[in-house]
Image: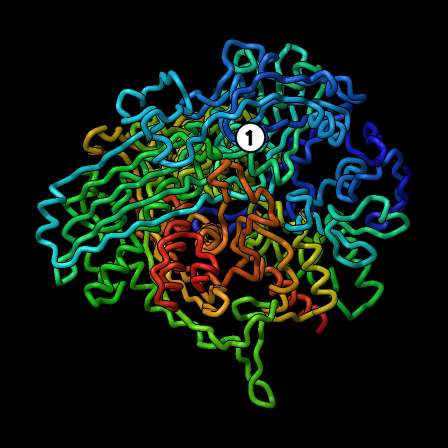
């Protein structure tokens, strides 16, 4: 037995206080369209960038969460006595200690208890909290809390959810979906019906059906859930945390703490990736509760094991699809049913259902469709937002179907897709017209036209002939094959993703822009609450400000709740919406600057009144290029400071019976070609190349665009061949909550990802841009699957594909 | 217990360390060096990679006591380490100053030029190549890549992949990371000429 840990010893080299400014930075060059470098890049490569797990405060305590060891149970009793008596422990909290009448939170439906009360509904649900002077003390004390569980029957799939007499995951639901769902264990249901699919089916020469299974994927961001809550003198709390949407967190946190929103002040600390997994709360309320109770700063940092329980996952899905086509390859109809498992709490499930339903047909023109998507409540881990948001699961299935149909018609899979590709003007199954470029056929043409990587790249010529580099073979350094039994396959896929929040959501953002003269130079400062999660929004905001205001020096303020909401860093929306807000505010700043200029110098030159004026290179110039004044002369010691909201054009909810409605604001498209080599003896897959073509409308920062496309592509590759949270069907317990057992692609698993970027402007968007982050995650999975099918001749209707699916063992 | 360890060239004495604490914990929470990251604390992700007597290790798997009397280099000390390597073995590795100058000239944007001289070649290459997104994997990758380039000045792509296979990155898809290491190697060769 090792001795118990002691309190931290402050050493002289430890910096005092909370590092809050070490997350942004500023830069001096690069307008839109240039590959400007990240303003926070230097901080990140020197280790100075302050991530949420790096927060530190003198005298702080460490918080720890005790989580349920069972998936569904009544809590008979909780005994915290021994834990509380542990030396070094400052507080132990349970449901009883929640201070306000509001005890639940949730993104849309407030069904998630801040701490379990009466019941636990999934394995790993938070039950109690401990604050102690050392993280290990907190963990050990938590282990001494005794909980008496009486286990309840489990809901684990559609059959057990809707069976007669099934237990209800949430009794007495009062949310607004309950009136139209067929069963209380169904969170939301969205049909989309257009034309007459049954009648159209009679015109089909070929009909193919398929049943597909999509595994539960994890965001697996590297920066663990973490943050620091510091109690403030006015009885409120300051929270430094990694999140995707500060204001959404605030709206959910404050009522549970029993505090008005202005007493909960939130600052974004450095975010180590998000991918949807930080849309829901994790440790936010817990750290605040412990800080308020102990009167001391409390830091919480999940370890990887806990992180797998601390955030929602991608919905696993079962999908049934039917497609028909005439002999010449024209689609006649599509019918499908998509069952998403939402797990124990609603999270983003209703919106994921809307997306899956409205995008279920993919980027194809079909007049007659019958679609139904539902999300279940179950005792599995809660699922919510992850990159691709409902469109990913559908894309996996409809793309498998397109290949099946092509095979049945004896056509090239790209040719069949081209024949049915949607284009500008096509009606979606929701009745919405696609009113911007939709270059589906062109993207496919581009990936297909690219030369294939040479065969047998693992053979390299040397003096004596040729030698095998096992590192390039399936199995790699494990040296499992020297090429015998290795076959190659090529597969294609394309996908359709909406950008921004849909279904009538008021999807706005706020930006505050200030311009002043510092040391004789005009300087712009941009302040938004946008969560920079790694995507590069801060880079783009500085580029927009430089372009709009003609200054070179731009400072990006840390994101916090002292400025209006920026909405979520998700749905590929931030460059569009917060970028739009920055542009909008910059335009207002420009107008104000010109007014000041007219006031000061209007009488000196007639162009002040008559010409179109621009800000360029730190000067006011006419559209003819004549310089009227420098910004320094115009502003002198006046500062212009404007905060404005900006909205994209409105959307509307889908009709609950027919799914009709202009529900989405913008679409993005990506296509992939995958080349794989498969060791058919061992079932091992090596992806050799995963080429992508994507339309981005306008590449504001080409370097970041490529990085986003490659990152999204790799996450799609992960779900294709390795990533899956495995939930035991008998106990609903998670079997692999670690990076040892949940595999994400390493640099050895990831092939070359050449990227071909199209820029067809969307006239409705700022600069014509199109959200880009998610689309590449859609099509890379089905492309890899198609390539493995092409190599092996197997059906492979589930993802991820495991060796046993290939060898049949 | 007390642990004596040289970190980034400075002798440090840390008191009251509990036997169960990892080197990673001591660096981050006791020495105020949070640059090494805590993504799995299980030896699976490489985010916590530091050099222990020159050898890259996952500091989350090293008990603090095992570092007694040894030398640790973290991402915070990487630039300095590269400079010293150059003065100790001129000609081998990278002449930091000329690299940094080249880096500045070749940078697509000069937002970082003021600080360019303070970065090691591999740090500068990561910034320039767009190899940093969320950046959580970056410190560990930098330490691993720096060691690769020290022992293997012109690595093949397969060498780079092999050397970095213990470092997970969830954001970049690794393409830009490969670009960065190739860029650092090329600049290193250029400077050696
Ligand atoms: S934190 Fe050490 S290997 Fe992941
Ligand atoms: S940049 Fe985010 S994990 Fe690598």
Toward the viewer: B152 or A72? A72
Q: Ligand 1 closer than 8 Å to the CB at disc 1?
A: no
Picture quadrant of residue A491: bottom left
Chain ID at mark 1: A
Way the structure is coloured: rainbow
Quarter of the rendering containing residue A408: bottom left
- Left or right: A3 in relation to A216: right
| A474 relative position to A430: left or right | right
Q: Is residue A703 visible in this depiction of the protein? A: no
Residue found farthest to the bottom: A464
Q: Nearer the viewer, residue A73 or A4?
A: A73
Up-down: is A61 above or below B41? above
Residue A35 appears in the rendering? yes
Circle 1 sits in a helix, a strand or a loop, which is it? Answer: loop
Query: Which residue is located at x 54 percent, y 55 percent?
Result: A745
Residue B25's place in the image compared with A696, above or below, is above
Compared to residue A267, the image places residue B125 above or below, namely below
Q: Position of residue A636 (x, y in %)?
A: 55, 29
Q: Position of residue A532 (x, y in %)?
A: 53, 38
Residue A29: image location, x then y, percent: 54, 47
Q: Position of residue B120 (x, y in %)?
A: 71, 56
Question: Label 1, on which residue?
Answer: A70
Count the numbered circles shown.
1
Q: Residues within 10 Å of mark 1 (few under 14, many from 20)?
A: many
Q: Quadrant of the N terminus of chain A?
A: top right
Between residue A271 and residue B78, name the one nearer to us. A271
């Amino acid at each position: 037995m090792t001795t118990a840990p002691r309190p931290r010893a402050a050493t002289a080299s430890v910096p005092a206080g909370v590092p809050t400014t070490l997350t942004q930075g500023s830069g001096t060059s690069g307008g839109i369209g240039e590959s400007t470098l990240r303003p926070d890049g230097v901080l990140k490569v020197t280790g100075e960038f302050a991530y949420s797990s790096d927060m530190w405060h003198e005298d702080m305590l460490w918080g720890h969460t005790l989580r349920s060891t069972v998936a569904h149970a009544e809590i008979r009793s909780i005994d915290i006595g021994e834990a509380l008596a542990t030396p070094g422990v400052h507080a132990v909290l349970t449901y009883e200690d929640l201070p306000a009448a509001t005890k639940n939170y949730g993104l849309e439906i407030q069904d998630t208890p801040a701490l379990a009360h009466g019941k636990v509904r999934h394995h790993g649900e938070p039950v109690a909290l401990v604050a102690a002077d050392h993280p290990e003390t907190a963990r050990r004390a938590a282990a001494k809390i005794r909980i008496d569980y009486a286990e309840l029957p489990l809901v684990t799939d559609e059959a057990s959810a809707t069976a007669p007499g099934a237990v209800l995951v949430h009794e007495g639901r009062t949310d607004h979906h309950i009136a139209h769902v067929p069963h209380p264990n169904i969170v939301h249901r969205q049909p989309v019906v257009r034309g007459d699919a049954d009648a159209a089916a009679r015109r089909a020469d070929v009909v193919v059906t398929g049943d597909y299974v999509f595994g539960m994927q994890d965001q697996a961001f590297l920066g663990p859930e973490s943050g620091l809550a510091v109690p403030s003198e006015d009885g409120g709390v300051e929270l430094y945390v990694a999140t995707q949407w500060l204001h959404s967190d605030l709206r959910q946190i404050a009522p549970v703490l029993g505090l008005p929103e202005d007493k909960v002040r939130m600052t974004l600390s450095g975010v180590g990736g998000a991918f949807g997994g930080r849309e829901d709360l994790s440790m936010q309320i817990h750290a605040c509760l412990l800080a308020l109770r102990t009167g001391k700063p409390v830091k919480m940092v999940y370890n990887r094991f806990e992180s797998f329980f601390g955030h929602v996952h991608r919905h696993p899905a079962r999908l049934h699809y039917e497609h028909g086509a005439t002999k010449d390859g024209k689609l006649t109809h599509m019918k499908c049913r998509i069952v998403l498992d939402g797990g124990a709490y609603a999270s983003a499930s209703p919106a994921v259902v809307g997306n899956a339903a409205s995008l279920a047909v993919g980027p194809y023109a079909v007049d007659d469709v019958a679609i139904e998507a539902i999300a279940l409540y179950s005792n599995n881990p809660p699922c919510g937002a992850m990159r691709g948001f409902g469109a990913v699961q559908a894309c996996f299935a409809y793309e498998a179907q397109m290949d099946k149909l092509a095979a049945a018609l004896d056509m090239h899979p790209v040719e069949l897709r081209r024949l049915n590709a949607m284009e500008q003007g096509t009606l979606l199954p929701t009745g919405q017209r696609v009113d911007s470029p939709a270059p589906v056929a062109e993207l496919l043409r581009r990936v297909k036209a690219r030369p294939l990587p040479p065969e047998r790249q693992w053979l390299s010529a040397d003096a004596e002939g040729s030698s095998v580099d096992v590192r390039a073979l399936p199995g790699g350094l494990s040296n499992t094959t020297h090429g015998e039994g290795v076959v190659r396959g090529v597969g294609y896929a394309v996908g359709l993703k909406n950008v921004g929040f849909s279904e009538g959501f008021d999807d706005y953002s706020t930006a505050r822009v200030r311009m002043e003269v510092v040391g004789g130079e005009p300087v712009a400062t941009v302040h938004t609450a946008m969560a920079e999660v790694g995507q590069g929004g801060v880079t783009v905001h500085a580029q927009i400000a430089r372009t709009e205001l003609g200054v070179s020096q731009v400072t990006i303020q840390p994101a916090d709740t002292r400025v209006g909401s920026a909405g979520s860093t998700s749905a590929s929306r931030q460059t569009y919406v917060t970028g739009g807000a920055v542009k909008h505010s910059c335009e207002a700043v420009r107008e104000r600057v010109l007014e000041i200029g007219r006031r000061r110098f209007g009488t000196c030159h007639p162009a002040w009144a008559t010409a179109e004026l621009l800000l360029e290179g730190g000067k006011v110039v006419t559209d003819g290029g004549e310089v009227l004044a420098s910004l320094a002369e115009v502003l002198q010691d006046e500062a212009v400071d404007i905060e404005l909201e900006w909205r994209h054009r409105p959307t509307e909810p889908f009709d609950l019976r027919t799914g009709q409605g202009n529900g989405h604001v913008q679409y993005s498209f990506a296509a992939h070609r995958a080349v794989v080599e498969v060791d058919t003896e061992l079932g091992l897959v090596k992806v050799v190349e995963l080429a992508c073509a994507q339309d981005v409308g306008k590449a504001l920062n080409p370097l970041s665009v490529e990085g986003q496309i490659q990152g999204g592509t790799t996450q799609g590759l992960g779900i294709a061949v390795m990533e899956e949270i495995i939930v035991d069907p008998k106990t609903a317990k998670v079997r692999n909550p670690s990076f040892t057992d949940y595999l994400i692609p390493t640099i050895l698993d990831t092939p070359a990802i050449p990227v071909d970027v199209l820029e067809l402007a969307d006239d409705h968007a700022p600069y014509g841009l199109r959200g880009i982050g998610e689309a590449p995650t859609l099509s890379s999975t089905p492309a890899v699957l198609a390539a493995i099918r092409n190599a092996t001749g197997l059906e492979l209707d589930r993802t991820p594909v495991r060796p046993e699916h290939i060898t049949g063992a | 217990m007390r642990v004596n360890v040289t970190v980034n060239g400075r002798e440090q004495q840390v008191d009251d360390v509990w036997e169960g604490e990892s080197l990673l914990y001591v660096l981050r929470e006791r020495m105020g060096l949070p640059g090494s990251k805590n993504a799995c604390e299980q030896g699976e992700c490489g985010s916590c990679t530091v050099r222990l007597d020159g050898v890259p290790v996952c500091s989350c798997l090293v008990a603090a006591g095992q570092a007694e009397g040894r030398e640790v280099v973290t991402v915070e000390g990487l630039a300095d380490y590269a400079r010293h390597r150059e003065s100790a073995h001129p000609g081998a590795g990278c002449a930091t100053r000329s690299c940094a100058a080249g880096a500045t000239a070749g940078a697509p944007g000069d937002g970082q030029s003021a600080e360019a001289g303070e970065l090691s070649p591999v740090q500068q290459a990561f910034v320039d190549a767009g190899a940093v997104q969320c950046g959580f994997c970056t410190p560990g990758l930098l330490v691993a890549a720096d060691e690769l380039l020290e022992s293997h000045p012109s690595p093949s792509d397969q060498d780079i992949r092999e050397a970095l296979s213990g470092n997970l990155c969830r954001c970049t898809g690794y393409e830009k990371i490969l670009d960065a290491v190739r860029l650092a190697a090329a600049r290193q060769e250029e400077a050696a000429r």
